[in-house]
Every structure is written in structure tokens, then in C-alpha cells.
Image (spheres, helix red, strand yellow):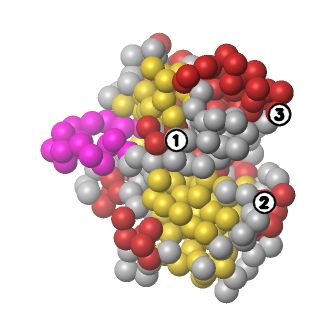
């Protein structure tokens, strides 16, 4: 069992929890994720690592209540436990694998929206701890929906906040803020990392492609087993088939087929849709999730 030692309400039905998981905390890296279950019958819920404390043996997760399973998670309190807390899964951010002298030459802009702010935070914190200053944009529809601003401000070189309605910071979305930084403020970047809703990452990647800035996105499609067996998180990346849970979650944003990924997300939610995907994708579909009969 994995005990909850901290619980905090952030905004817009978004919750933060610190969970005792010493083995996960010992080896997880920015960019990776965990899969949690509330009990034996609970749904497997993939969540990106928001932070970790190796000394205390805790891992921080952030989630938004969007269905029955996350509603059950929300009702857990300090002292309660998760049945399962599996990880770390996926690949760590490619940035932390770079030689430090090369990384310090990069001019990196992180763009996060909504709950996507949570997985951006450990990457920016890691950069700060290794003497690398990065710029960060936090975007939200309104000021009340913004999360982790103070935490991000403490580790970012420059923090820019943008709200769609102009209630706080820059008026506009993340793409508008990028345009302002590059075209009006003369900022130059060698790399952009965008994490948030899939539609947001799609438009950021389209813009940065026009600006000739290499871009990393963290894909968050439906996942079932987290081991590459079920095929739920199948993606088209350039001319290759990838699976977000084992090959990612980070990919070249200029190569990801976002339209296909979003259509696939909708289709995978119904039995008829899964059958059609099975037919269309053939040998590249994968099996083993219990829904694929493979």
C-alpha cells in the first residue's frame, strides 16, 4: 500500500498529492509517469510525475477529476493509501540526458497549459538545480485556473503567464505569447517543450515549425497497461509507429500526427471504435489489453 502524506486542492477540480513510494522516488526522472490504482477493482490511471523527494521517499502527482476513478481518488485523504503505485514508466526527458555543457548552450522555452503545468515543473526544477535558466509560459483560460505558479516562479529563469480572457498576465493563449516573445520582444530559442492538452500542443508545434524552432511534446493519449502491450497509446510519428507508454511520452512535435491521435482517442472509447482500429491498423495495432482479442 502507498500512503498519501499530503493532499492539496489547486484549482478547477485539480488536486495534488504526495504519496509514499520509496522505490519509485529513488529512480524516477523528470518526464516519466506512474500508474495508480485506488483498490483491487480500480481503473489503472496514468499520471505524470510532478515532483519527487528521494530522501523522504515521496512522489508528487497532480490529477483532475474527469471520471469515476479520479472522483474516487479525490475522496482519498491524508493517511489513506493507493492499492498500486507503479513506476517509473516511460522515458525520461531527453534534455536531462544531454551533456551539461551542451545543455547550458541551449535557449529553452517551456510552454504548459492546464494540468500540463505539473509535468513541466520537475523538468524546470531539474534545469534550475543544474544551473540552466529556462523561460516558461503558463497558460490558462482564466487566472483562477492557473496552477503551480509560485513553485514555477521559484525555478524558472523567466516566467510568463497568459490567460485567454486577459484576467491575469498576457492576454492570449500560449501561441500568442510565443509570438509576442519572438516577434515583439526579440527572444530567440533553440528548443521549445510543450506539454498540455493535445490540441494546444498541436498548435504550438505548428507555430514553432513556422519559426524553425525544434519542439518536444509530451503525448497523453489513452493508456491501459503502460507496457506497450495493449496499443491504446499508438501514435504516428513521422513514418514510424510509436507507443507513448514505452517510446515516450516525449516526441518530436513536428513529426507527431496530432489529428490522427485525437481521432484515435475518440474511437478507442467505444467497442465499435476499437474494432475499427483493429481492422485499420492490422499488425501494428498490438494486442493484450483484453479489448483487442490479441
Residue 107 placement, left or right of 254 = left
Question: Which comes before the other along the chain, label 2 or label 3?
Answer: 2
Q: Residue at x 68, y 24 (%)?
A: 278
Q: Give the quarter of the figure containing the C terminus.
A: top right
Q: From this viewpoint, which residue is outermost toward the bottom?
A: 79
In the image shown, does 241 or 149 lie closer to the viewer? 241
Residue of label 2? 69
Residue 228 is labelled as 1
Alpha-carbon span between mark 2 and mark 1: 22 Å
Residue sitting at 55 percent across and 22 percent down? 283
In this view, 77 is above or below 131: below
Point out the image quarter for the N terminus. bottom right
Disc on res. 35: none
Image quarter for residue 25?
bottom left
User: In what element is the residue under mark 2?
Assistant: helix
Q: Position of residue 207 (x, y in %)?
A: 52, 19
Circle 1 residues within 10 Å: few <14, some 14–19, many ≥20: many
Dot 3 alpha-carbon crowd within 10 angstroms: few under 14, some 14 to 19, many 20 or more: few
Which residue is identified by label 3?
A: 270
Per the rendered image, the range of residues in magenta is: 93-112
Q: Secondary structure at mark 1?
A: loop
User: Percent from the top left, x then y, of residue 271?
Assistant: 82, 33
Amino acid at each position: 500500500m502507498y500512503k498519501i502524506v499530503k493532499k492539496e486542492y489547486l484549482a478547477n477540480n485539480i488536486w495534488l498529492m504526495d504519496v509514499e513510494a520509496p522505490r519509485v522516488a529513488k529512480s524516477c526522472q523528470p518526464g516519466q509517469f506512474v500508474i495508480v490504482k485506488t483498490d483491487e477493482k480500480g481503473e489503472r490511471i496514468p499520471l505524470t510525475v510532478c515532483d519527487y523527494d528521494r530522501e523522504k521517499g515521496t512522489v508528487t502527482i497532480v490529477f483532475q477529476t474527469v471520471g469515476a476513478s479520479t472522483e474516487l481518488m479525490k475522496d482519498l485523504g491524508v493517511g489513506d493509501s493507493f492499492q498500486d503505485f507503479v513506476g517509473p514508466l516511460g522515458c525520461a526527458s531527453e534534455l536531462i540526458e544531454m551533456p551539461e555543457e551542451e545543455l547550458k548552450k541551449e535557449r529553452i522555452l517551456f510552454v504548459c497549459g492546464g494540468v500540463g503545468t505539473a509535468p513541466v515543473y520537475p523538468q524546470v526544477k531539474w534545469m534550475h538545480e543544474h544551473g540552466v535558466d529556462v523561460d516558461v509560459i503558463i497558460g490558462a483560460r482564466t487566472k483562477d485556473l492557473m496552477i503551480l505558479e509560485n513553485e514555477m516562479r521559484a525555478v524558472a529563469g523567466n516566467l510568463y503567464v497568459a490567460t485567454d480572457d486577459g484576467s491575469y498576465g498576457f492576454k492570449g493563449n500560449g501561441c500568442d505569447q510565443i509570438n509576442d516573445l519572438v516577434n515583439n520582444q526579440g527572444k530567440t530559442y533553440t528548443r521549445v517543450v510543450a506539454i498540455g492538452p493535445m490540441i494546444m500542443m498541436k498548435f504550438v508545434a505548428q507555430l514553432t515549425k513556422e519559426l524553425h524552432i525544434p519542439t518536444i511534446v509530451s503525448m497523453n493519449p489513452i493508456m491501459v497497461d503502460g507496457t506497450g502491450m495493449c496499443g491504446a497509446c499508438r501514435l504516428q510519428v513521422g513514418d514510424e509507429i510509436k507507443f507513448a507508454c514505452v517510446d515516450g511520452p516525449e516526441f518530436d512535435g513536428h513529426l507527431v500526427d496530432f489529428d490522427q491521435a485525437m481521432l484515435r482517442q475518440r474511437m478507442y472509447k467505444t467497442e465499435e471504435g476499437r474494432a475499427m482500429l483493429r481492422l485499420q491498423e492490422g499488425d501494428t495495432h498490438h494486442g493484450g489489453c483484453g479489448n483487442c482479442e490479441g
